């Protein structure tokens, strides 16, 4: 018997024949093999971003490598991100991912999220009756998935007969493509169209994918017309999803839209305290206040710092003081989960076009410079939590120019075959730079 580590080492060895060392380092050096059973390889990658890229770009190559290795076919690759659990007996029947902590009980309500929270409670208590769809949007790490799953858990507990499907936007695409390839579109449709509650996480990933959007449109209509509930999350409102099919946009906007903003200081303190308590970590008020004052834009990072300190305590019997906290904050900020800094994005994009950051910030309208500038904005939109306004500011542009620049890139990506590759390379340069290596 080979251990899963052996299998993974072999897969990476095969991949290295086809991919550059940079690609291998960027995407696979911090991948961890988790399990292997029944022709399923389960791997874990530290960030959701990497999970998506590996899934979209390397899935066929990895599955082919497995076929190569075992001289057989039909392998399935399951990619977990962060601390997602792998469900061994997952029959693939659209059950909720465990994430047991994602309940209303564990959700701290503050000004920044109270509207979304109230809407979620209302939907959980009266599915299909009040707000349909419920569309929750906001930046990464602010609790969208938490609320989405809290609705799922609540309904599962209170209406055990209701059927629930949970799907991520990019997995919807993957599953659909697979179903078409294997001639199982009927099963695929039944699985998502005939449910009482459909939870769709990160819908932004289906925008621009024509056939997925059409399929989703029909899925949506079936569920909606049956009076069943749909809840959707996205990193931005429908209006800002430039490649979203208009029919879908209209549907989404016809429900209730609820945004989540970054939490204020008081809420951040409450979240930090709640998390510490759940982990059995006793923290003084001044330490809680200090952490909450340092981490402002992302609840996931806030939780990351608390988890880190729990680990310190267990490993080294450390006393918790400012110094330990600073160290935990530093480690969380520079870990693989780090969001690239705008100046790095601008620098790497400029460098790719043999330009300087000042060129991109200036007014030169030559074709090359304009393209580089637009790509830099596009990359910032893809890789950071910045608003259109903030992205514009980085390059001395306003909100409108920024939005139209991003749209332009999204358009050219469809018509100019060179652009997706260029963007991929630039993204890789940026993320390699901000990652651990
Ligand atoms: P998103 O889906 O918006 O990127 P998540 O729902 O994954 O964010 O939240 C990131 C982490 O922060 C999760 O562990 C979640 O439980 C936690 N979290 C976010 N908001 C809250 C909140 N208001 N109360 C408690 N935990 C929260
Ligand atoms: Mg999420």
Image (spheres, rainbow, N blue to C red):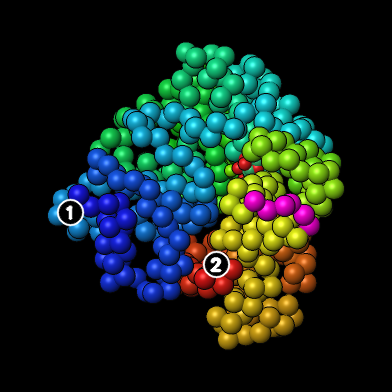
Q: On the image, which quarter does residue 144 sit in?
A: top right
Q: Tell me the magenta residue range.
A: 317-322
Name the residue tied to disc 2.
436
Given this view, does label 2 or label 1 mark the residue nearer the observer? 2
Regarding residue 178, the answer to whether it shows in the image is yes
Whether residue 368 sits left or right of residue 258 in the image: it is: left
Closest to the observer: 349 or 156?
156
Q: Is 145 left, or right, of 69 in this rendering?
A: right
Quadrant containing ligand 1 reads top right
Residue, x 76% and y 43% (percent of image)?
283
Q: Which mark is residue 152?
A: none
Q: Secondary structure at mark 1?
A: helix
Query: Residue 334's x, y, as percent?
Result: 63, 64
Q: Residue at x 31, y 35 (%)?
A: 185
Q: Position of residue 265 (x, y in %)?
A: 83, 45
Tell me the residue that label 1 is attached to.
70
Magenta highlight on residue 305: no
* 241 over 19 or under it: above or below: above
Disc on the earlier residue, 2 or 1 = 1
From the viewer's perspective, tell me whether residue 131 is left or right of residue 111. Answer: left
Which is nearer the eye, 25 or 342? 25
């Amino acid at each position: 018997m080979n251990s899963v580590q052996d299998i993974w080492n072999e897969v990476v060895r095969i991949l290295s024949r086809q991919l550059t060392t940079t690609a291998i380092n960027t995407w696979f050096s911090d991948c961890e093999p988790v399990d292997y059973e029944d022709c399923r390889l389960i791997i874990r990658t530290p960030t959701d971003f990497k999970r998506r890229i590996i899934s979209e770009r390397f899935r066929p190559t990895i599955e082919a490598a497995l076929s190569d290795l075992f001289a057989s076919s039909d392998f399935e690759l399951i990619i977990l991100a962060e601390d997602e659990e792998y469900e061994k007996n997952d029959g693939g029947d659209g059950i909720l991912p465990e994430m047991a902590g994602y309940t209303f009980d564990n959700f701290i309500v503050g000004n920044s999220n109270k509207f979304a929270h109230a809407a979620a409670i209302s939907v959980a208590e009266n599915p299909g009756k009040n707000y349909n769809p419920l569309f929750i949007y906001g930046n990464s790490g602010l609790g969208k998935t938490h609320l989405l799953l809290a609705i799922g858990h609540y309904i599962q507990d209170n209406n055990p007969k209701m059927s629930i499907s949970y799907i991520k936007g990019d997995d919807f695409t993957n599953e659909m493509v697979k179903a078409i390839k294997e001639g199982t579109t009927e099963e695929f449709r039944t699985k998502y169209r005939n449910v009482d509650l459909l939870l769709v996480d990160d819908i932004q990933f289906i925008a621009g994918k024509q056939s997925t959007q059409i399929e989703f449109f029909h899925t949506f209509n079936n569920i909606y017309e049956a009076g069943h509930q749909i809840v959707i999350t996205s990193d931005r409102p429908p209006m800002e999803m430039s490649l979203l099919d208009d029919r879908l946009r209209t549907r989404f906007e016809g429900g209730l839209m609820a945004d989540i903003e970054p939490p204020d200081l008081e809420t951040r303190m409450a979240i930090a305290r709640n998390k510490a308590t759940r982990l059995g970590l006793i923290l003084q008020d001044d330490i809680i206040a200090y952490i909450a004052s340092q981490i402002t834009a992302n609840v996931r990072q806030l939780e990351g710092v608390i988890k880190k300190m729990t680990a310190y305590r267990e490993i080294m019997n450390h006393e918790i003081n400012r110094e330990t906290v600073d160290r935990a904050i530093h480690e969380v900020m520079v870990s693989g989960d780090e969001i690239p800094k705008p100046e790095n994005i601008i620098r790497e994009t400029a460098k790719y076009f043999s330009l300087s950051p000042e060129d991109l910030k200036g007014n030169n309208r030559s074709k090359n410079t304009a393209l580089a500038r637009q790509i830099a904005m596009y990359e910032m939109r893809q890789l950071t939590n910045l608003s259109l306004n903030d992205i514009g500011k980085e390059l001395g542009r306003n909100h409108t120019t920024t939005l139209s620049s991003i749209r332009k890139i999204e358009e050219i990506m469809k018509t100019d075959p060179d652009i997706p590759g260029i963007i991929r390379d630039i993204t890789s340069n940026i993320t390699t730079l901000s990652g651990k290596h």
